[in-house]
Structures are given as C-alpha cells and as structure tokens.
Image (tube, rainbow, N blue to C red):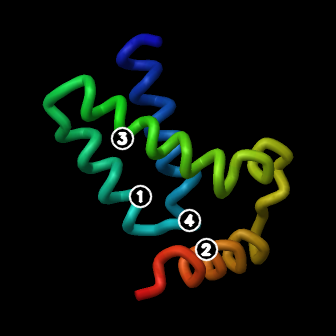
Amino acid sequence: MTQMQRQTSIEELSSKLKPILGSKIDELYFKYTLADSIDEKNEIAHILGALYKKHLGKLLDKKVLQGAFCIKLREYVLFRFFRQ
C-alpha cells in the first residue's frame, strides 16, 4: 500500500468513526499526522482499524447506519466506552 493510499484509508476510517467516537478520533488522527516514525503511524493505523472493526465494520459494510440510528449508536458508544 502506498503512502497516498494509506493516508486515504486512514482519513476514511477517521471520518467514519468520528460520528460515533467524536473528538477521540480527532486526537488519534492528529497524532497520526504528526507521527515521526513509521512504527508510530502503523500503531495508530492499527488502533483505528480495530476500532472500526469493533464498532462499525459490519454495520457500515451493510449500510445499516443512517440518520437517527447513527445518533443513537453514538450516544450508546460514548456512554458505554467513554463515560468518566
């Protein structure tokens, strides 16, 4: 995978995860863009891929997430995984 293809896929993953995980995804993407080493970029890419697979993989692939359902799912994920 070329750097351009990887960057696109990281951007796509981030944009798909953002409605559900919000600013946490922005932080990860920002760290990815500032990462100096390939190892650090690979680690962040792996994290984004795992989050996608865990939270959205099947639903987005089947185009189930739409409108109000997406908002409800976001509220659930934020409550379940990011409550303080």
Query: Measuring 71% from the left and 69% from the top, which residue is drawn there?
Result: 70
**In this picture, residue 78 sits left or right of residue 58:** left
**In this picture, residue 34 sits left or right of residue 23:** left
Secondary structure of residue under mark 2: helix
Against 53, residue 35 (above or below) is above
Label 3 environment density (alpha carbons within 10 Å; few <14, some 14–19, many ≥20): some
Q: Which amino acid, by three-letter code, is at mark 2?
A: Val
Whether the residues at callouts 4 and 2 have beta carbons within 8 Å, the answer is no
Mark 4 / mark 1, whichever is N-terminal: 4
Whether the residues at callouts 4 and 1 have beta carbons within 8 Å, the answer is no
Mark 1 / mark 3, whichever is N-terminal: 1
How far is the residue under mark 1 from the one under mark 2?
Answer: 13 Å
How far is the residue under mark 4 from the one under mark 2?
Answer: 10 Å
How far is the residue under mark 4 from the one under mark 1?
Answer: 9 Å
Query: Measuring 76% from the left and 77% from the top, which residue is drawn there?
Result: 68
Q: Disc 3 or disc 4, which is closer to the eye?
A: 3
Mark 3 / mark 4, whichever is N-terminal: 4
Mark 4 / mark 2, whichever is N-terminal: 4
Q: Which amino acid, by three-letter code, is at mark 4?
A: Pro
Label 4 environment density (alpha carbons within 10 Å; few <14, some 14–19, many ≥20): some
Q: Which mark is residue 44?
A: 3
Return the residue at label 2. 77
How far is the residue under mark 3 from the one under mark 4?
Answer: 19 Å
How far is the residue under mark 2 from the one under mark 3?
Answer: 20 Å
Q: Disc 1 or disc 3, which is closer to the eye?
A: 3
Which quadrant holds residue 44?
top left
Return the residue at label 4. 19
Q: Which amino acid, by three-letter code, is at mark 1?
A: Ile
